[in-house]
Image: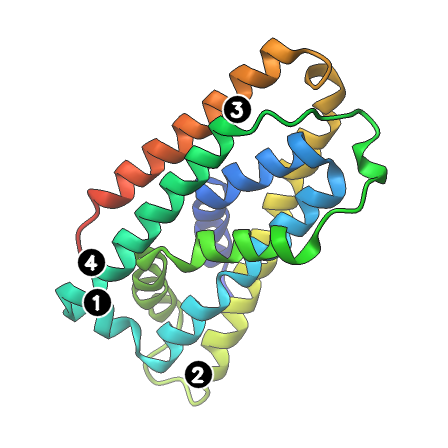
Amino acid sequence: MTVAFLLTTLVVVATPGTGAVYTIGAGLARGRRASLIAAFGCTLGVVPHMVAAIMGLAALLHASALAFEVVKWLGVAYLLLLAWQTVRDRSAIEVDADGTPVSFWRVTGTAVLINLLNPKLTIFFFAFLPQFVPATAANATLTMIWLSLVFMAVTFVVFAVYGVFAATMRRQVIGRPRVMAWLRRTFAATYVLLAGRLALEARS
């Protein structure tokens, strides 16, 4: 594993995207535990892309316009649904919500879908991993699996940091209805912008 791989991975993961936005939102809305669950779910969402890249399935998305468009528009629709749910959410948030049980499967499922319905992530793995695997490597597949696991570990750590930081700020904002309303609108608008960016994506 090279320093270049770690630096590239850190830059890619730290750049705010749908997973980071969802994790931050979970931290603000439900607290530290929910943010960690969201980070875990987003990390799990990387697994299908990793498997697809290693098995060569990413080539299908890269070569097939129909397959790419289907996955892309499913992702766009899901992001718009999240935006709609966020802007319509009027539930009150209490300071001691950390003591309230958080639905592990609901938060994880949403986080997994956010990363799963992003065809560019599969193509990213398809183009990214091979650059750090020597063509003559005897255990190329094992090397790709190891690098993918490192990518996932970095994803979890970075997202967890985002989420926990957001959770520490919730006491500053959850007692202010206007601030919460502004945050909900901001997150909803961010989901719409990310959906628009995904809609404009083309196969590379």
Say which element carries label 3. helix
Q: Which mark is residue 67?
A: 1
Q: Which mark is residue 184?
A: 3
Q: Which mark is residue 69?
A: 4
Mark whose residue sits in front, 3 or 1: 3
The local crowd at label 1, few if under 14, some if 14 to 19, many if 20 or more residues have their Cα within 10 Å, is few
Q: Which mark is residue 141?
A: 2
Task: Determine the residue positioned at 73% across, 35% down.
Answer: 31
Nearer to me, 43 or 70: 70
Mark whose residue sits in front, 2 or 1: 1
Q: Position of residue 143 (x, y in %)?
A: 48, 78
Name the kind of residue labelled 2 in the image: Thr
Tag 3–tag 1 contact (CB < 8 Å):
no
**Quadrant in the rendering for residue 127:** bottom left
Name the kind of residue labelled 3 in the image: Arg
Say which element carries label 2. helix
Say which element carries label 1. helix
Task: Determine the residue positioned at 28% across, 44% down.
Answer: 198
Q: Which mark is residue 167?
A: none
Is 42 above or below relative to 22? below
Tag 2–tag 4 contact (CB < 8 Å):
no
- Label 2 vs 4, first from the N-terminus: 4
Tag 2–tag 1 contact (CB < 8 Å):
no
Decide if residue 96 is on the left or right side of residue 140.
Answer: right
- Label 2 vs 3, first from the N-terminus: 2
Tag 4–tag 3 contact (CB < 8 Å):
no
The local crowd at label 4, few if under 14, some if 14 to 19, many if 20 or more residues have their Cα within 10 Å, is some
